[in-house]
Amino acid sequence: MIDLGAFGEALSLLASSPTAWVVVPIGLLIGLVFGVLPGLSVPIAMAVFLPFTLNMDFVSAILFLTAIFTGGGFGGSVPAILMNVPGTTAAVATCFDGYPMARQGRHNEALGIALAASTVGTAVGYILLLLLIQPVSRLVLQLGAPELFMIALWGLLLIAALSEGYFWRGVLAGAVGLLIGTMGMSSAGIMRGTAGSMYLLDGIDSTAALIGLFAASELFALVRAEYIVADASARTVELRRIASGFLHAFSRIFIILRGSLLGSVIGTVPGVGSSVANLVSYTAEKSLSRHPEEFGKGCPDGVIAAESANSSSEGGSMVALLALGIPGGAGTAIMLGAFAMHNVTGGPRFISDNKDIVYAIIAGNLVQALLLAGVGLLFLRVAVLVVKVPLRILVPTITALTVLGTYALSGTMAGPVTLAAAAILGVVMKRYHYPVVAMVIGILLGRMMEGNLLRTWQLGRGDLTIIFERPIALGLLIAMVLTVAWPVLKADRIRNLVRGRVRATPEA
């Protein structure tokens, strides 16, 4: 499956391109900074620095952009762990256990664990890309609108496993998220949910909504506290403990590998990628765990599962770009722009005619994964100092950054207004135990689901049973039903066992 001759040429190409090894650490640092700052995103960083790649050779340019991609993938976990603010949509599941660990004074260990999982996840994703790029690219071509709709629906219904005891509230929250996500002008030219406002014609800013639902609503809960970490003795910043967390993750190597495999596979699907991969991996690990009750309360396994999946999905997303010339998301769309700037066209011909360049990009990214460990440890030594900042200073600062960030994204007051509305909604949802994550997934997947459902309806000429006629779509439907039903059946079985034991216990 690997052309060893071309791989040897790729290594020579990397060795003869010193520029690449100058720009890669810089790209990692840029990605880390943009991933950490609320309101800024990795695609924004890549777009800002895209013009700088014009004077680089093609391999150096792509490695620079993928370094920003890699750094940002991990960078988003830092605010997720320290402040419950998912720096990117890929870090949503990292909040579930990372933030409780920080509140317990285990922030150093949580960040070290996340860094290790991200490092290994990135490496596994590119190793799989190296081995399977050609067969996987053929499989991706078989995914049509019905399959993409089922994948998006599957991602939405994962709330069944994430919302223990509140299944139907999760379904309702997800449905409302879908409605919010499809606000604005439809592809048919029909306005939905705009209430006559011209500002909503393009829909709402999903990034502003995500930050509001998760971050701003959490800030309200922190107003009466003095520090993120209540225990003064636990507000330490120790590189030794970060390194300890880093090494601890390798004792859970099978969890890392499971998350990496899931992330790589889901990352190959255009439009889905890391936003769903981290949730799928988290849910799967929770279902397989012997102690699922620990998840959501500061369980390191939850951080490992989420971070390994969202990092490995990067390698999966490169499949569509390199093999098909199709961007799988905003980040790879900007990379496609770099292809055009260097007069290169991705696709099957690109792989067959330029195997040495393809292998050079993959090998360069494997080295990037190792560099991420070193650069990330040094970066964390500074980033983790946030736990020492009093909340009377931190809360206004984060609020200002999120407002400015959302304004920068939209260029109008629509961003900050969306942020404020989402924050209020998030507070109400948490108060009445409606899962916020379900609404977030609905918002993120709304447009994609609508578009693919419409195309499925057109393919079936008004008959949606076409899903049952397509083997891959049918397989996804079965897997989705099993994923949703298994936690429910497992919970019922546990309740029945408990009842049986209570009945069997003689009265005192």
Image: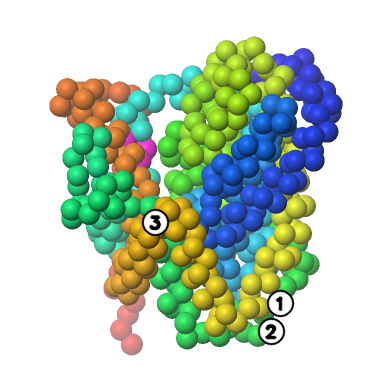
> Which amino acid is tagged 1?
Thr
Q: Residues within 10 Å of mark 3 (few under 14, many from 20)?
A: few
Question: Is 165 rendered above or below residue 252?
Answer: below
Screen quadrant of the C terminus: bottom left
In which quarter of the view is residue 62 placed?
Answer: top right
Dot placed on the residue nearer the N-terminal end, 1 or 3: 1
State how far apart marks 1 and 2 are (Cα).
Answer: 7 Å
Residue that appears at 74% across and 16% down: 6
Query: Residue most toward the left?
Result: 462
Residue 288 vs residue 385, the one in the foreground = 385
Looking at the rendering, the stretch of residues picked out in magenta corresponds to 149-153
Q: Is residue 256 magenta?
A: no
Query: Which mark is first along the chain, 3 or 2?
Result: 2
Identify the residue at image location x=29%, y=35%.
451
Determine which residue is flagged by label 3. Answer: 412
Instruction: Classify mark 1: helix, strand or loop.
Output: loop
Looking at the rendered structure, the secondary structure element under dot 2 is helix
* Residue 402 percent location from the top left of the image: 49, 64
Q: Which mark is residue 236?
A: 1
Residue appearing at x 71%, y 31% in the figure: 55
Give the mark toward the camera: 2 or 3.
3
Seen from the viewer's position, the closer of residues 145 and 406 is 406
Left or right of residue 250, residue 214 in this image: left
> Could you say whether the residue bearing mark 3 is in a helix, strand or loop?
loop
From the viewer's perspective, is 173 left or right of 113? left
Residue type beneath disc 2: Ser
Whether pointer 1 and pointer 2 mark residues with C-beta atoms closer than 8 Å, the reply is yes
Residue that numbered label 2 is attached to? 233
Q: CA distance from mark 1 to mark 3?
A: 40 Å
Answer yes or no: is residue 270 visible: yes
- Mainly helix, strand or loop, the magenta region? helix
